[in-house]
Structure formats: C-alpha cells, structure tokens
Image (tube, helix red, strand yellow):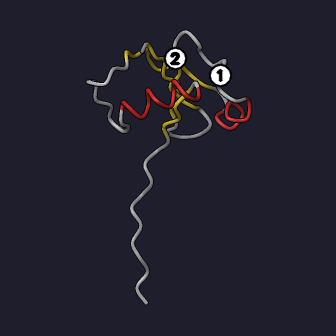
C-alpha cells in the first residue's frame, strides 16, 4: 500500500498516515481541525514485512483500509502506581 505521512504542527509528535490515492479525503473534519496544519513528511510503501518505529505495520494497514487513515500519537509515559 502506498501511503503518505503527515505531521501535525498543532499537536506535537502526532503523525497521520493516509493512502496516497485517497490523500486526506477520508479523514474526518473534526480530526483535521484538532491536528491543525498538516505538513507532508514522506511517502512510504507499507507492507507486512516492513518495520515501523512506533507502530505495528499490520495495524496501520488495517486501520487505513477500514477507516481511511491511521493516527500515530506520541507514546504515553509509563505510570508508576501510587503506594499507599
């Protein structure tokens, strides 16, 4: 699957993956508003054998096929349980 990756200028470390042929047409307007200005980072060929730094490529492909996009958010910091 040929994919285009955008980064959000409003939300730090948020990346939006979309199928290149669809571009941003299937991304909900509310999500576009939340992300603000999007800047194209790269075009990327997604395939099952490929490794991505912060996401499972099969999950990304599945989400793009089902919803039209995949939103990569920054990893959550590990939380330490409160000791009572």
23 in relation to 32, above or below = above
Q: Secondary structure at mark 1?
A: loop
In depth, the one of 49 and 73 nearer the eye is 49
In depth, the one of 17 and 7 nearer the eye is 17
Position of residue 27 in the picture relative to residue 69 (left or right): right
| Of the image marks 1 and 2, the number of the one nearer the N terminus | 2
Residue at x 64% of width, y 34% of height: 35
74 in relation to 71, above or below = below
**Residue that lies at the very extreme toward the top in this rendered image:** 21
Q: Secondary structure at mark 2?
A: strand
Q: Residues within 10 Å of mark 1 (few under 14, many from 20)?
A: few
Position of residue 24 in the picture relative to residue 78 (left or right): right
Q: Quadrant of the C terminus?
A: bottom left
Residue at x 59% of width, y 29% of height: 67
**Residue that lies at the very extreme toward the left in this rendered image:** 49
Could you say where residue 39 lies in the image, as x and y percent from the top left? 56, 22
Q: Are the residues at dot 1 and dot 2 in contact (C-beta closer than 8 Å)?
A: yes
> Which residue does the numbered mark 1 point to in the structure image?
26
Could you say where residue 75 lies in the image, as x and y percent from the top left? 43, 48
Q: Quadrant of the N terminus?
A: top left
Could you say where residue 25 lies in the image, as x and y percent from the top left? 66, 17
Residue at x 52% of width, y 31% of height: 70
* Alpha carbons under labels 1 and 2: distance apart: 9 Å
Q: Quadrant of residue 49?
A: top left
> Which residue does the numbered mark 2 point to in the structure image?
19
Please count the marks in the image.
Answer: 2
Could you say where residue 83 lies in the image, as x and y percent from the top left? 40, 85
């Amino acid at each position: 699957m040929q994919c285009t990756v955008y980064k959000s200028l409003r939300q730090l470390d948020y990346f939006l993956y979309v199928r290149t042929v669809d571009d941003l047409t299937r991304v909900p307007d509310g999500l576009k508003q939340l992300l603000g200005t999007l800047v194209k980072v790269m075009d990327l060929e997604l395939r099952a054998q490929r490794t991505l730094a912060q996401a499972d490529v099969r999950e990304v492909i599945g989400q793009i096929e089902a919803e039209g996009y995949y939103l990569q958010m920054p990893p959550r910091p590990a939380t330490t349980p409160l000791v009572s």
